[in-house]
Amino acid sequence: MHRYQHGDVAIEASVEREGNLYVAKVFILEEDGESTSLGTFGYFASSDAAYSFAMRCGVAFVEGEALPRPPCQTLSPR
């Protein structure tokens, strides 16, 4: 699903499942067709939480605000 910000910039949030967790991702689609991936934004316990966080990050990026920090961070095993 896309959300349009300022009428011409589309924000597309996506959620992928990794094991028991969900990963939030977001893409910004410009009016001229250019797409920007903001990458992944951490792991979440539910798909709704991941999607909501990805949308908040997309809106902040389009508005020129600082991106919110994820509610928790996971450490990769060494």
Image (spheres, rainbow, N blue to C red):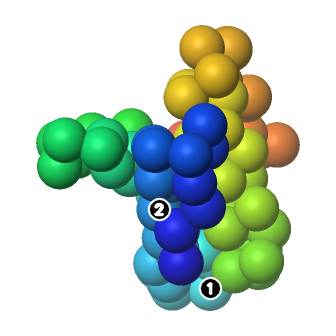
- Front residue of this view, candidates 61 and 41: 61
Question: Label 2: how many residues lie within 10 Å, few (<14), some (14-19) or many (20+)?
Answer: some
The residue that mark 1 highlights is: 20
The reply to whether residue 72 is visible in this rendering is yes
Residue 40 percent coordinates (x, y): 44, 49
User: Residue placed at 56% from the left, 27% from the top?
Assistant: 61
Q: Earlier in the sequence, mark 2 or mark 1?
A: 2
Q: Amino acid at mark 1?
A: Asn
> Tag 2: residue type?
Glu
- Residue 42: mark: none
Is disc 1 surrounded by few (<14), some (14 to 19) or many (20+) residues within 10 Å? few
Counting the numbered discs, the total is: 2
Q: Residue at x 67, y 68 (%)?
A: 51
Q: Position of residue 78 (x, y in %)?
A: 36, 42
Residue 49 lies, in percent from the top left, at 79, 68
The quadrant where residue 34 appears: top left
SS for dot 1: loop
From the viewer's perspective, is 8 left or right of 49? left
User: Which residue is the extreme one toward the front?
Assistant: 7
Mark nearest the camera among 2 and 1 is: 2
Q: Nearer the viewer, residue 24 or 36?
A: 36
Which dot marks residue 12?
A: 2
